[in-house]
Structures are given as C-alpha cells and as structure tokens.
Amino acid sequence: MAIDPSNLRPPFSESPSADLQITRRSAGAQHTAEPSPETANAGESKSLRVSNASSPEAESIQSRRSAAAMRRIEDNEQRKKNLQSNDQGSLWPAYTLFTSTVLLLAAWLIGPRLVEEYNFAATRGRVRAEYENAVHLLKDHPLEQVSKAFQLVAHKVRPSVVSINAIKQISGGRPGSHLTGFGSGVIMSEEGYIITNAHVLEEASSCQVQLHDRSRYQADLVGIDIFSDLAVLKISASNLVPAQWGDSDQASVGSIVWAIGSPYRYEQTVTSGILSGKNRPGDKTRKQNLLQTDAAVNPGNSGGPLVDANGDVIGINTSIYGESFQGISFAVPSSTAQFVYRQLIENGKVVRGYLGVHPREVSHRLAAHLSLPDLDGAMLEGVMANSPADIAGIRGGDVIRSWDGKAIRRYNTLYQLAEMSEPNSRIEVVLIRNGQQLKKEVVVGELPQPAQTVGVGEPENLELPVPPTIDGSQWSSRRNR
C-alpha cells in the first residue's frame, strides 16, 4: 500500500518553527524555496491562528500555559506577602515590650492619682446620696415622737426635783462665815417630804431648798441613814408636785433612764443614758446594792432622781466612778430608797433585819469545789455566834441560794433582803451544803442602830454625822454634791 507523503504529520512540537514548516508543507507542496523573514512571521502568525482556531488541542495547550503563568504570578505575590509578614513579625516582641513598658510607667505614675480621685469621687457621691436621702426622710419627722417622749419624761419629773444648799458654819472663823455645799433632791409627797443623799448634808448646820420655780424654803431634817447614804427633809409649801416611785427590781439592764439634778449648780439639768448594770457594790460599804448607769452625773447631781421611761423614780443618784464623770455612775435602787424613806418618816430611824453572816462572791473555783450548778448565791465565810443564822443551823461554807422565795444572784443581795426583812419574822432560806440542797427557817433579828443616826425632833442646827468611809473633807471626789 502506497503512503501519500502529503498526509504524513510529524509529532507535535512545541517549537513554533516546526509548526510553521509543517503548516507550510500542508498548504502546498509546490513551494520549496525558504521564505523571507517577513513572510515567515506573517505566515507563522497566520498558521497559529489557523491552528488555534481549527485544533482543540492547541486551545488546551494555550489554556494550560495561561494557568501556569497565573500561578507563577500568584506564587510571587504570596512570597512577597510572606516576606512582609515575616518582617513585621520580627518587630512584634520589641513592639510588645515597648507598649508594656509604657503602660507600666503610666500605671506607676498616674495610677495612684486615678485611684485616689476615684475614691474621693465615690466618697463624695456616697455622702451626697446619704445627705439627699436624709433630707428626704427627715421631712416626715420620723424622730419627732422619740424626741417628744424624752421631753414628756423631763416635763413629768422636773417639777419634783429640787436644789439643796447645805450650810456649814466655819469653826473659829469670823461671825457669819460659812461654807455652802450643794446637791439635789426629789419631792416624794404632797406634804413636802424630800429624799436626798446623806453625804449632801454632811457637817451641815442647816439647809435651804429651791424649787423648780426658784422659790426657796428652809428645810427640816426628818432623818438620816448612813448605811444607805439617804436622808429625808421636809419643807412647808403648798401645791407641790411629787414624783412617783418606780420598781428598780423590774428595771431591765439596757433600758433608757434619765438623771435630773443640779450639777455644778445648774438647776434642772436633764441627762439621759441607759441602765448599765444592777447589784453593784458601793464605795462606802460592800453591803450596798446599787444601780449603774451611763447617764451623765456630776457634782451636784447627788440626791437627784434616776427615772425610767414612765418618769417614775427607780433610783437616787449617789456617786460616780473616779475623780470625775467617766461614763459610770451609781444610784441607790428605789427598792432600798423607798424602804428607807418610809422608815425614816414613820420611825425617824431605819429598823433593819439581822442575819449575822459574812457572805462573799461565789468564784469559779468555789463553784467547782462545792459542786454548784452556777455562780449564783452568797457563799458564807463565817457565821456570828448566837446570831439568827447560827440558831437556824446555818454554817460557814454554806451557799445561800434564795431568801423567802427570792433568788440571790450576788452576795450583796443577801444583805439587802435580810436588812429589809421585818425583825422577828420567819424566813425560809434555801442553801447548798456539800453539794446537797437544804432548807432552813430563820427568825430574823434586829440590826443594832449606829450611834450617829439622827432622828426626828433633833434641833435643825444639829451637826449631821459624816459617813464612816468619807475622808472628812467637805467635798469627796467620789461623791456628787
């Protein structure tokens, strides 16, 4: 079989000249001479267009070439970006360190000031808010009722409170020369009976009483009791406004109290506080059983009333702790004051019951040693021979827990209950001995009267006795004349 040479085509070559030669041979075999460069270029271009237009393979080749060129361009662009990114990343640690340093310096230099300004602003805002809230709420006068209650108590008691000037003649001085002490008192009856402190009248030859309306009256001494530091005077006046007795035994620690008197000669002074404690031993004698309060009490308040929220007298102010008022003052409870007041008016003296024991405080050590359930009661250090306690079979070392059904919390309560019992009365006493509870019946005796007691009918200018624990000077720093 013969092969037509004109139909033969060499394999595809990427060389443009080969394509050109093939194309030219295909166009006509009669041309054998080499073309000129211009003619060759023109023919090549024409051949490429013809080839591209007529061959799908040529189109695919051209497409691949274009895609490869585009990828090379994109790769170059990506490499440039990577280089720029690497350059920037190499500067990031330095940039971070610089920024952190600047921030730390700013915090160190400016931070405290900013915090201070913030705190000031917060405080100012809070104070302003509190102020505005207070202004808004106080428009309704929420404390007006409380203030009126305080005023009502003062208005009820003040007409009953008097100022007392105690006059003492100076021995060996010029005629008419004297010293004047001052204190307070409270009117307790329309007949003109006034209760005050005994030490207000010490060494006085006479005394003068000034009422709330500044009217003055000469006072007569009804009686004086050294043990309780109380005395009773009487004035002849009409239209008196007496105070009412309250119950000190029912008064609760923490309740509001008022003290009224003439501190430093400032008449009708009202102070308030709370009842701070009860059953406190006094500075005169440990037999005293006093009330403690933080109401301001100063020299001149002695003998004035301590009243509760009802305006009733629950105590008679008698002394303070220390050289001047330090928030602790004491008052004779109304249970004792009322007992002494009535005894002095009825008998001119105070008749007290007598047990004949020496009690002391129950300590933790004693409570553990004696197998006591708590620290209540009065532990007896000793019993007087042939005394009512001795006759009843009470012995030293016993712990008395109750007297006539009344619990004994502190040792000085036993003194108070025994002395306020009527002589010859029979009292049931509950005590603990060797860990066992016993009951004893005591026939109360009568406490001997001190020789110094002044009774009714004594001359008005009689020199009054000085309490035994007072140093004899006219003004005792612990007493509030």
Image: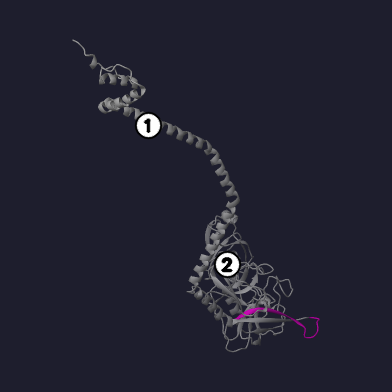
Is 30 within the magenta?
A: no
Name the residue: 31% across, 24% down. Answer: 43
- The residue indicated by pointer 1 is 70
Which residue shows up at 66% across the image and 81% down it?
A: 164
| Residue 197 to residue 321: above or below | below
Q: Please name whichever residue, 81 or 192, is drawn nearer the observer in this view of the structure.
A: 81
Q: Residue furthest top?
A: 1
The percent coordinates of residue 159 (x first, y second) are 58, 83
Q: Mark 2 or mark 1: which is in front?
A: 1
Rate crowding at label 1 as few (under 14), some (14 to 19) or many (20 or more) other CA atoms within 10 Å.
Answer: few
Badge 2 amino acid: Ser
According to the picture, the residue beneath numbered tag 2 turns out to be: 276
- Magenta residue span: 171-187
The answer to whether residue 297 is above or below residue 102 is: below
Q: Quadrant of the C terminus?
A: bottom right
Looking at this view, is 324 or 416 the one in front? Answer: 324
User: How packed is label 2: few (under 14 Cα within 10 Å), some, or many (20 or more)?
Assistant: many
Instruction: Tell me residue 203's x, y (percent).
Output: 72, 78
Place of residue 251 in the rendered image (x, y in percent of width and height, measured from the top left): 53, 71
Asked whether residue 119 is in view, the answer is yes
Whichever of callouts 2 and 1 sits on the residue coming sooner in the sequence is 1
